[in-house]
Amino acid sequence: MLSTYLRPLLPSSSSRIDRCIMCQTRGSLRQRHAIHKDGFFAGRAFYQCAECGFAYDVLAAPTPDSFYQRNYAADRFDRSGIDFLYRTTEAVDLSMCLDNSGIAPKRVLEIGPGPGWFMESFLACNPETVYDVVELTDFGAESCRAAGAAEVHAINFEDRSAVDGLAGRYDVVVSIHCVEHLFNPMAALANMLRCLKPDGVLYVHTPNYRDDRDENWHHYKAPDHICFFSPESFARLGTLFGYKMAVAIVAYDDNDVIALLRPNPGRLWRMKRALLARSRRHPVLG
Ligand SMILES: [Zn+2]
């Protein structure tokens, strides 16, 4: 049930975690070490569940609010960089995949758009779409408004009651390189699914974790990246949420994974095929 995951996560340090926050299995957590190229992870451990493969690193921040404020309050975005390039390209990819699959994105919600680069590109492809965003930073919210966002919500997406007003409104919910930053990704993902219309589709793009990643894999960057999914753990997620949900996985250059989740499998596999075909054309992304 989604409601299982819509409760606050209490632990504020890894020492207090006794079960996997995804599959809830007790005693399944295995400690792993990683060293980021910049040294952020040196001497630190994160946990991977032996049961479902989900990997998680809880930091010693007093509260998620203070963590987000400390790490995401400033404008660190660079329009000339790879982040801008892949987001604008990916919006074209998703637009074409939705079109190929016969899914009309009348109303779209994006969680964590930053300056709104994906949105801007998506709206250029779909001028009729009403596009809302959930963005906590002032600079991001301002930039999204200027780029065409209809509604800008500064709400904590891990909080069930804060998201109630958005439930059941959207044809497509998008989250790109966002869930790996969250303290309680399960609550955020459950809330994203709550926001979908009955035939809506959730599109989640995040780093693709594997056991054999190099110690200096560029996505090992604490404290920015807290949790890591894989195709296997995403597939497990569909089952765990208790939906008749289909999950499709595609990857950009193997470093990232994209999950597509719907309440029913209709058109999902067409979307997956279309995304795979698109991603092969520009494998440098991600
Ligand atoms: Zn697990």
Image: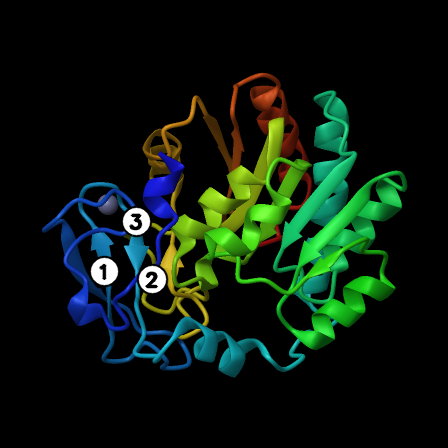
**Label 3 SS:** loop
Q: Callout 2: few (<14), some (14-19), or many (20+) C-alpha neighbours within 10 Å?
A: few
Residue hosting label 3: 54
Q: Nearer the viewer, mark 2 or mark 1?
A: 1
Which x, y percent locates residue 67? Answer: 44, 77
Q: Is mark 3 within 8 Å of ligand 1?
A: yes
Amino acid type at mark 3:
Phe
Q: Earlier in the sequence, mark 3 or mark 1?
A: 1
Q: Quadrant of residue 152?
A: bottom right
Q: Callout 1: few (<14), some (14-19), or many (20+) C-alpha neighbours within 10 Å?
A: many
Residue hosting label 2: 214
Q: Earlier in the sequence, mark 2 or mark 1?
A: 1
Give me the disc on residue 219.
none
Residue hosting label 1: 47
Please state, as top left, top right, bottom left or bottom right, where the N terminus lies in the image: top left
Foreground pick, 233 / 103: 103
Q: Earlier in the sequence, mark 3 or mark 2?
A: 3
Using the numbered discs, state the Cα–Cα distance from disc 3 to disc 1 in whole angstroms. Answer: 8 Å
Contact between marks 3 and 1 (CB within 8 A): the answer is no
Amino acid type at mark 1:
Tyr
Using the numbered discs, state the Cα–Cα distance from disc 2 to disc 1 in whole angstroms. Answer: 16 Å
Q: Is residue 81 left or right of residue 157?
A: right
On screen, residue 14 above or below 48: below
Using the numbered discs, state the Cα–Cα distance from disc 3 to disc 2 in whole angstroms. Answer: 17 Å
On screen, residue 113 above or below 229: below
